[in-house]
Image (tube, helix red, strand yellow):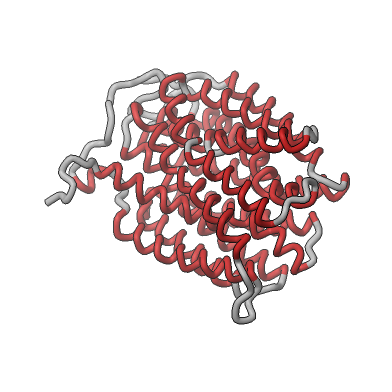
Amino acid sequence: MRIFPRLHYAWVISGVAILAVFCCLGLARFAFGMMLPGMAQDLGLDYSQQGLLGTGYFVGYLLTVATLPYLAPRLGARRIVSAGLLTITLALAGFSLSSDFVVLTILYLIAGIGSGGAFVPVMSLASHWFHPSHRGRAAGIFLAGAGLGIIVSGFVVPRLEPLFGFTDWQVGWLIFSCLSLVLALLTAVLLRNNPAELGLEPYGRPGPLASGSDGPADTRGFRSIVLHMGAIYAIYGATYMVYATFIVTTMEQDFTFSRDHAGQVWAWIGFFSIFSGALFGFLSDHLGRRNGMIIAFGVLGLAYFLVSMNFGLAGLYISIALFGFAAWSIPTIISAAAGDYLGIQAAASGLAVITLMFAIGQSLGPVGGGIVAELTGDFTMAYGISAALCVLAITLCLWLRPPSHG
């Protein structure tokens, strides 16, 4: 007997997905941007080491994503996501017990392994549980969890205090580890791989819309579509991670913000980003995936450009608002587009390959930004390069053909 007879279980899946993304991105990844200044000060890390520490996460993420085309069809999203969240729990607990740079890098690599295992399968559920009429919005709703994680880290981290011999940032990682354990158990209980397990159909309208269908994979070249979308996603991964990793450091060093003030501004990024996925998912459902991505890269490129040109506080605040509103735009649209272009049966494995390229971009972004900052003295040029790469991404989007339907 259903407790909520009028509630399609797809919305329960959405709630669980929000919490899973909150853990694997919001806590494991985006809290790092708030923790990094304190960690760098205590451990004496230079810009290059800060970038390498962040890159450790993405190497782990990449390793997991590389195996998902093989694992996803055999194990299913429920098992992989739950295991990924448990891996994050263990890695963050280890983070709270160490102050050695090499050990922390290895632990953050393990956290990346867990994040990749949780994020990609949970995002692929949008293609299984929702028809194209709601697929983009669903993926956007899932990604609201990342924004919630940014808000939590923005308010929690500046208020942390040393406790029982632990530094403030070690206390923070321990708190986030405990939260991750609770969410891993909840995911294991409630998540389902597809509607058929409960005798249901996907939510929404099954008919083909302007942006996709539930039909078979695009027959015009699976490999070319995957590589094309992967290149677009890789540019997003490299550029947004430069911003997300170093913007708090920029606020504290270039704008002399206090830790508490920077945390409040960081939390505003999280607040704006809560609406990002749903907004751009809605746009892509109605305007098409390609047009949605073009708009998104335009907004992101402007955000990077503004902070690269030193327009003062006004430029910084406008940049932060723009970045927040477009933060999860590309992951939302890519997750929906995988089902449109590749068909729901191939969406998980295809999205894994696309996300592998995204992970490569994420890996190169922070270390590249750190090296550029080490050479120039700040992150201005790194943000400028990110803006230029967004122009390249728009060009690639213009070359992306609409999906065909057989």
Q: Position of residue 231 (x, y in %)?
A: 61, 33
Q: Quadrant of the C terminus?
A: top left
Say if 168 sits above or below 279 in the image: below
Q: Is residue 183 left or right of residue 177?
A: left
Q: Which sits in the foreground, 354 or 329?
A: 329
Q: Which sits in the foreground, 260 or 208?
A: 260
Q: Is residue 99 left or right of residue 89?
A: right
Q: Position of residue 229 (x, y in %)?
A: 55, 31
Q: Position of residue 162 (x, y in %)?
A: 63, 74
Q: Which sits in the foreground, 319 or 184?
A: 319
For this orientation, the residue located farthest to the left is 1
- Residue at point 16%, 51% (across, down): 3
Q: Quadrant of residue 390?
A: top right
- Residue at point 81%, 38% (across, down): 381
Say if 295 sits above or below 233 in the image: above
Q: Is residue 252 left or right of residue 224?
A: right
For this orientation, the residue located farthest to the bottom is 164
Q: Is residue 60 left or right of residue 19?
A: right
- Residue at point 58%, 72% (across, down): 94
What is the tally of numbered marks visible in this picture?
0
- Residue at point 40%, 33% (across, down): 137
